[in-house]
Image (cartoon, grey):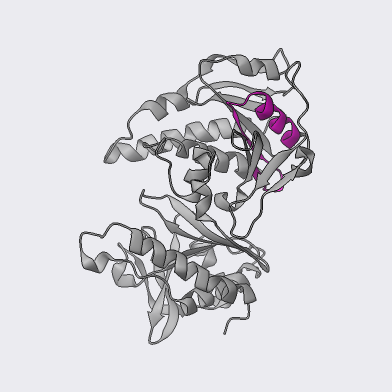
Amino acid sequence: MPDYSAARAVAPRVREHFVRHIEASSPPERPEQVPEPPDVQAVESIVDAAFWASLRREEGYTPKISLALLPKDRADRPLLFETPLPLTATALVRVAPAVERPGIHLGVWREEGELRVWGAIRTIPTFTFVLEVAAPGLLVIKHQRGEAGKFVNVAVLEGDQVKVIDERTSNLPDCPPLIASLVGFDRADSPDGRVNILVQLAVSMRAHGRGGCVLIVPAGSDSWLESIVRPIRYAISPAYSKLSDLARQPPPNGAEARAWQDALQNAVDGIGGLTAVDGATVMTDAYDLLAFGAKIARRRGAPRIEQVTLTEPIEGSLAQVLHPSRLGGTRHLSAAQFVHDERAAVALVASQDGRFTIFAWSPCEEMVHAHRVETLLL
């Protein structure tokens, strides 16, 4: 029986998620490729061991590991341990330095009735249960989606808090395509998945830890300038189009795919780095960079924003209507005011403490809607 009570609380809900998605997925070419949903006991044991490992330190370092529940005969070119390791906090902490690089997972499966760590692997099948140690006491349960390398978060555990992602969020009226993509189900109005560029940008701007703001404005329109203090210190002229050029290209196949993905990530990180400068980074919805370090101002004649709707895509979370100043500091208030005045725009706001909020105008609610999504970005 696990000592970490949250492991028992989350395990049945996690299994239900995997069963539902495996049953709804397209059948694979071979019957043996059908993934097996994780059993409740396995989920409990993995979560429990990972949690206690996350609180340990080995030679001053906190372990950062990823565990995948997968039999070794289903793994593609795995690194196999001659003697499998016990699934204990001590064993995980000791092996962590060898597997802390991104994309490496420790394989876990039952051997002789006991869950053991049998080796390491980089490529895992779709719908494989994965648990990642993101920080001390912070665990993320996820699985890989259809596209290679793309993961969907299922639940986040932080201390005694259990947050299970509410997939129904993507079906709500006015749900921005970015939210739907983060939850894991791309909207029909983004058939090519290009909205995932904004997901990458959100992760990048959150990673530098300084906080930041990105304003996404309609291409071909200058109306957003009415809500910006001028002159703009770091205006870009002509617009910087490296990211938009890459986005317009059909994703290549084969050997060229990796080069394209690397170039795209470098372009995203370049813009993400600009968000560390005080002020807002402005780019079009076609991914052309227009400015950074821009100061937001209330549009002349526009009313001061007094309230927003706040939601979080977590099961059991209720919508709140509150003053935007309660969401954070000046960055949140000014971003909410910008979207209130420029209703075709979307604002992405990262806080220094790791919180991430997406502001978008809601025609149904006739007010700015603030989506708290940091649980989807871990």
Residue depicted at 43% across the width and 76% down the height:
39
Above or below 265: residue 119: below
Residue depicted at 78% across the width and 43% down the height:
326
Q: How many discs mark residues in the rendered view?
A: 0
Above or below 263: residue 84: below
Q: Quadrant of the N terminus?
A: bottom right
Q: Nearer the viewer, residue 171 or 72?
A: 171
Residue depicted at 55% across the width and 57% down the height:
165
The spot of residue 151 in percent (x, y) is 45, 53
Place residue 90 in its image quadrant. bottom right
The spot of residue 141 in percent (x, y) is 52, 62
Q: Nearer the viewer, residue 232 or 302?
A: 302
Place residue 278 in its image quadrant. top right
Above or below 41: residue 78: above
Can residue 86 be seen from the camera position used here? no
Q: In the image as oriented, which residue stretches furthest toward the left?
A: 30
Residue depicted at 40% across the width and 76% down the height:
109
The spot of residue 334 in percent (x, y) is 73, 30
Residue 344 lies in magenta, yes or no? yes
Left or right: residue 15 versus residue 24 is right
Can residue 361 be seen from the camera position used here? yes
Q: Where does the magenta region start and end? A: 331-356
Left or right: residue 245 versus residue 298 is left
Above or below 269: residue 31: below
Residue 44 lies in magenta, yes or no? no
